[in-house]
Image: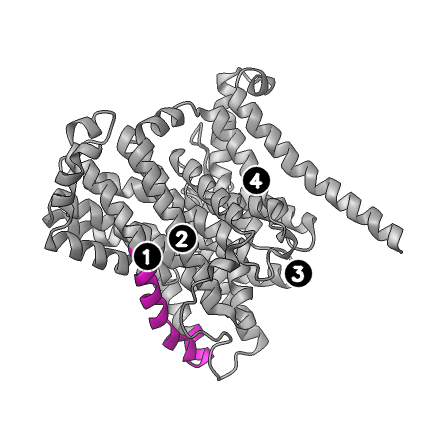
Amino acid sequence: MLAVLPAAAALLFTLQGILTLVAGTTLGIILGALPGIGSTVAVALVLPFTLTMEQAPAIILLLAVYAGSVYGGSISAILINTPGTPAGAATVLDGTPMARAGKAGEALGWATVSSVFGGLVSAVVLLMAAPQLAAFALRFGPIETFALICLGLVCIVTVSKGSVVKGLTAGALGIFLSSVGGDPITGEVRFTFDNYQLIAGFNLLAVVIGIFAFSEILMRIADGADGGGAQVEFNGLVIPRLSQWKGRISTLLRGTAIGNVVGILPGTGSATAAFIAYAEGKRSSPRGDKFGTGEPDGIIAAESANNAVTGGALVPTLALGIPGDVITAVMLATFTLHGITPGVRLMEDNPSLIAAIFLGFFVINILLLPLGMVVSKLAAPLLRIREPLMLASIGVLCVIGVYYVRGNPFDLLVMVVAGVAGLFLRRAGYPMAPLIIGMVLGPAFELSLRQGLIITDGSFMAFLTDHPIALFLLVLTALGLIIPLVRSIRDLQRAKTSA
């Protein structure tokens, strides 16, 4: 791969290539920051424009929009409690409280540096170890995937602020909502109540925007939106000093590692990685008890993981022709339209092109830092808009973004109903993150479980005896459930002793 880097640089660093890198990354950050747009829509919007471009710039443009939009979701998540992408839902948990405490610039600084680091590491991993990582991903069958998702569902316990019972209830509701529609094995429709609009299930983006963005609008209206400016003060992104990273590097490294591993596994995505990393950060960080109150470690864990997914997701896409997530599935169309066949011979048949893609992806993640500072600064005037106008603008963006994905008015109804339900659930003290976790992980959880049971003739014990990777992951899952319980019992005993 290193031998073809000069040829790759000649393909990439042309006038068109440089403009593509800068413009694509900037556009991605902007689209990712707009509530309701998201990475999938952003990549889909750009896809038609790549048809008139050469191979390398076309793919680089999509990668730039992809990586930029994943980072851009943190801007709206922190500043207006509205995740621009589903992965931003994890950033909301600590980013918004930190911004409301007058530290919006610092929150975005932590998010930006963590995003850049996670993305750069994923670019290095993609460049140096793509063949080996692709081979390892092939070892994950349905049973191993089921075990991984079980580990991800532990997030429901760790991100449930207040009552764990309410968190588990919200998570169970999310898993139930994910089961609406066609059965993944038999195709039989479930829980549709003869409504054909529900055959395809609920649109995840519509639910996420409804639960977080639309319910936030309703909450502010119910509380009485004032006529003044925004509730947070933001004067520009503040890069954290080196001394502030003391004791936080381990959280950054763990989040990055989780993002890379989850990204490599086909069909997972940045939302899954962000919540798993957030949960692991809460468990392992010495400041884990402050998660959810504006703790930088929560932002670091979520943002390093969801940006590390971008490089990891490209591994199965390029090496196997299997999309690592929804966005890379959209990218496969571009490869095909430009006469590129992803698969085991891709790197051998197109060495210069693939090296240009890897090198371009590395440059894109470097550009996130300066461009993130500029774009986030441009967001400051939005915070000085009168709150009623700002809420109306967010509402319009939510409607446009949700409707644009499928052009289905029913998705708007889903968004509104999810927003109203989110309002009542939040008023009752139910955390919203577990509900989204349930919806994100539910379909893959059911499919992998049922496929695994088919493989083992209905024997769940075979998951443990014949699949060592699954056994290891399930043991970690059990520890993730037991350790918080032991800590709760210990804290209760200490409280009784002190009383």
Q: Secondary structure at mark 2?
A: helix
Circle on res. 428? 3
**Residue type, mark 4 in image:** Leu
Q: Which residue corresponds to the image point at 70% horizontal and 52% vertical from the top-left?
A: 163
Question: Mark 4 to mark 2: distance in Å?
Answer: 24 Å
Q: Nearer the viewer, mark 4 or mark 1?
A: 1
Q: Residues within 10 Å of mark 1 (few under 14, many from 20)?
A: many
> Residue 425: percent from the left, percent from the top?
61, 59
Q: Which residue corresponds to the image point at 11% horizontal and 51% vertical from the top-left?
A: 14
Question: Mark 1 to mark 3: distance in Å?
Answer: 39 Å
Q: Which residue is mark 2?
A: 115
Q: Residues within 10 Å of mark 3 (few under 14, many from 20)?
A: few
**Residue type, mark 3 in image:** Ala
Question: Mark 4 to mark 1: distance in Å?
Answer: 31 Å
Comes first in the chain, label 4 or label 1: 4
Out of 184 and 323, give the one closest to the viewer.
323
Q: Nearer the viewer, mark 4 or mark 3?
A: 4
Residue furthest to the bottom: 227
Circle on res. 368? 1
Question: Mark 1 to mark 2: distance in Å?
Answer: 8 Å
* Image vertical order of residue 104 relative to residue 205, above or below: below
Number of disc labels: 4
Residue 14 is covered by the magenta coloring: no
Q: Which region of the structure is painted magenta? A: 367-391
Q: Which residue is mark 4?
A: 153
Comes first in the chain, label 4 or label 2: 2
* Image vertical order of residue 397 relative to residue 146, above or below: below
